[in-house]
Amino acid sequence: MEVGFLGLGIMGKAMLMNLLKNGFKVTVWNRTLSKCDELVEHGASVCETPAEVIKKCKYTIAMLSDPSAALSVVFDKDGVLEQICEGKGYIDMSTVDAETSLKINEAITGKGGRFIEGPVSGSKKPAEDGQLIILAAGDKALFEESIPAFDVLGKKSFFLGQVGNGAKMKLIVNMIMGSMMNAFSEGLVLADKSGLSSDTLLDILDLGAMTNPMFKGKGPSMNKSSYPPAFPLKHQQKDMRLALALGDENAVSMPVAAAANEAFKKARSLGLGDLDFSAVIEAVKFSRE
């Protein structure tokens, strides 16, 4: 199976490598083309524009940083719309809001192409291990045709119906994750300031009903003030903002998420946006100094 791939960030690179390792022929584009060099060594082909990738490939996957990047790749000069046509499928796995997905869907289908959104739950390590959770919505036939690729990229693929549902589900998942991370950070800082061992707190949490892979995976590094980026904090804050907007649209009160968003915003103002989202603990520490 041959696929195109747009975007080589932390997630995109890991996903593309899995496709190559599993026998897929992949043609890649990235805004900074030099980032493609390593992938060429592993067998990928490179195009200079998104339009060229679309022209060459029947199926193209995009994994981009935010709504503006997702829209730019589609609508700008030399973008997806210049070559999308009947018989071609576009799979946007970026985390965006439903409005962005609907706008892209309308443009793609208006040119005769087919579209599914497929945002993923999971960060760098699950992407490297092919253990993502794929939240797809849109053209059901294209979803079925994409299963061979999805089975390489993830451990489970959900089809959620009409375009927009995948985006909404992903924002809800990340809103819960961000709120949990903020509460977790407060607990670690509170334990330390109370004269308790935050490492012992991790052991206690791991033995109880609140045990989860995020606390277990992130906690030890957080206690060492180490935040290698698996999921950049700036992207988590973007997702919190979009989830809160979704809450406004549906008149859902979300005070916990709103408070967590403020903590992530504070962390960004401290210059921590490119670190892992667990660096939000530094904003909690700052607020207590």
Image (cartoon, helix red, strand yellow):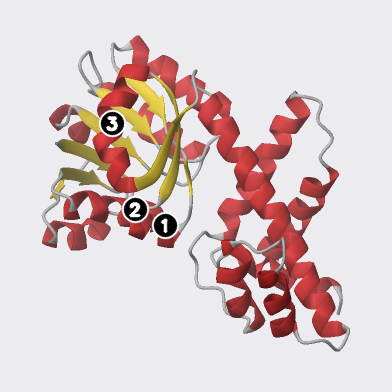
Viewport quadrant of the C terminus: bottom right
Tag 3 secondary structure = helix
Residue nearest the viewer, comparing 190 with 281: 190
Q: Is residue 186 above or below residue 152?
A: below
* Residue tagged 3: 146
Tag 2 secondary structure = loop
Tag 1 secondary structure = helix
Viewport quadrant of the N terminus: top left
Residue nearest the viewer, comparing 67 with 57: 57
Q: Is residue 9 left or right of residue 59?
A: right
Q: Which mark is residue 126?
A: 1
The amino acid on which the numbered mark 3 sits, given as a three-letter code, is: Ser
**Mark 2 or mark 3, which is nearer the start of the sequence?**
2
Q: Is residue 214 above or below residue 160?
A: below
The amino acid on which the numbered mark 2 sits, given as a three-letter code, is: Gly
* Residue 18 at x, y percent in the picture: 25, 53
Quarter of the rendering containing residue 148: top left
Measured in 3D between alpha carbons, the distance from the residue under mark 3 to the one under mark 2, in whole angstroms, is: 15 Å
Q: How many marks?
A: 3
Mark 1 and mark 2 in contact? Answer it, CB < 8 Å: yes
Measured in 3D between alpha carbons, the distance from the residue under mark 1 to the one under mark 3, in whole angstroms, is: 19 Å
Measured in 3D between alpha carbons, the distance from the residue under mark 1 to the one under mark 2, in whole angstroms, is: 6 Å
**Classed neighbour count for the residue bearing mark 3: other residues with Cα under 10 Å, few (<14), some (14–19), many (≥20):** some
* Residue 123 at x, y percent in the picture: 47, 56
**Residue at the location (37% across, 18% down)?**
139
**Residue at the location (61% across, 47% down)?**
174
Is there any visible trace of residue 95 in the rendered image? yes
**Mark 3 or mark 1, which is nearer the start of the sequence?**
1
* Residue 154 at x, y percent in the picture: 37, 46
Residue nearest the viewer, comparing 229 with 220: 220
Is there any visible trace of residue 266 in the rendered image? no
Q: Which mark is residue 130?
A: 2
